[in-house]
Image (cartoon, rainbow, N blue to C red):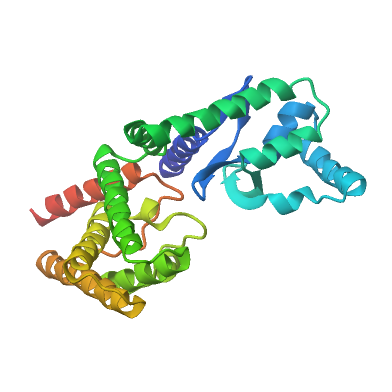
Amino acid sequence: MADANERNSKEKETEEKKRKKLVVFQGKKIRRIWENNEWFFSVIDIVGVLSESENPRDYWYKLKIREQESSQIELSTFCLQLKLIAEDGKLRETDCANTETIFRIIQSIPSKRAEPFKRWLAQVGYERVQEIENPELAQERMKEIYEKKGYSKLWIDKRLRGIAVRQDLTDEWKKRGVEEDIKFAILTNEISKAAFGKTVEEYKKFKKLNKENLRDHMTDLELIFSMLGEASTAEIERAQNPKEFGEHLEVSKKGGTIAKNARLELENETGEDVIIDENYLTQTEKEAKEKKRKKKLIEVENFC
């Protein structure tokens, strides 16, 4: 019974941490998620705020029908189905829209509350402009976001460093004519396969992830070896200056192999796998790290 109570208590704490990802407009909670380099907001939450309907889901359903009949526009086509925390604390797919689409939806809702909501969205957009003009500000806000998600400062430092390393690598690819996102993905898969023996999608499946960002669910060591693979690839790009895409593929394999060799050497010394199926869907990174620390202490005590 005690174990069950402790588990329930931890689940409530985790749920509370997840709810910190919400933003508040006039006392109402609006769920949002960072996707494709922009904020996407829960349409249901916004409809609930603006319409003051007791059943926002039903209002949204009828609104889509009314809009399609009057203007032949299907509002759902402008939305993405993204997983957000539902009232039961579980991740569930819901209609989400970026700022531009939200403004379009607002036009279809007769509401006195629309104007202040537009100003609120404009403020969110203004913050992004500030971040573009001042990258340090963006970094500080990103730190705050990760802290609210339950990541430790050491992990956050590695994650942000990894973003910088990734940017350096993509800059090197762009300098040599690699522009398309699909080609970036192919080259990234080559690094991942060489370093970890898995493509990005295979790695996500291994960690039981869906649309979540893989690196947000990596441990400190996984992040370090990811950085090593990409930093090594960038250095070889600069040294060898490949021209053809096939040459970039070979360079990516070499960079990933450097990370692989270092990973295998560490695993040989410690007897522990770097690649693990741990994710932070049901527990935060801090909680996972603390759990490991306690497990190590118990193992040491038992050994002694």
Q: Which residue is painted at 27% across and 78% down in the image?
A: 250
Image quadrant assignment for residue 39: top right
Q: Which residue is painted at 45% across and 49% down in the image?
A: 282
> In this rendering, does residue 257 appear at all?
yes
Q: Position of residue 209 (x, y in %)?
A: 47, 60
> In this rendering, does residue 42 appear at all?
no
Number of residue marks: 0
Q: Is residue 6 left or right of residue 230?
A: right
Q: Position of residue 126 (x, y in %)?
A: 51, 28
Q: Which residue occupies the extreme left position in the image? A: 304
Q: Which residue is painted at 77% across and 36% down in the image?
A: 56
Which is nearer the eye, 8 or 228?
228
Image quadrant assignment for residue 234: bottom left
Q: Is residue 222 left or right of residue 34?
A: left
Q: Position of residue 30 (x, y in %)?
A: 61, 32
Look at the image and tell me in which quarter the N terminus lies.
top left
Q: Which residue is painted at 11% across and 56% down in the image?
A: 303
Q: Is residue 108 left or right of residue 299?
A: right
Which is nearer the eye, 81 or 217?
81
Q: Position of residue 4 (x, y in %)?
A: 46, 43
Q: Which residue occupies the extreme right position in the image? A: 69
Image quadrant assignment for residue 32: top right
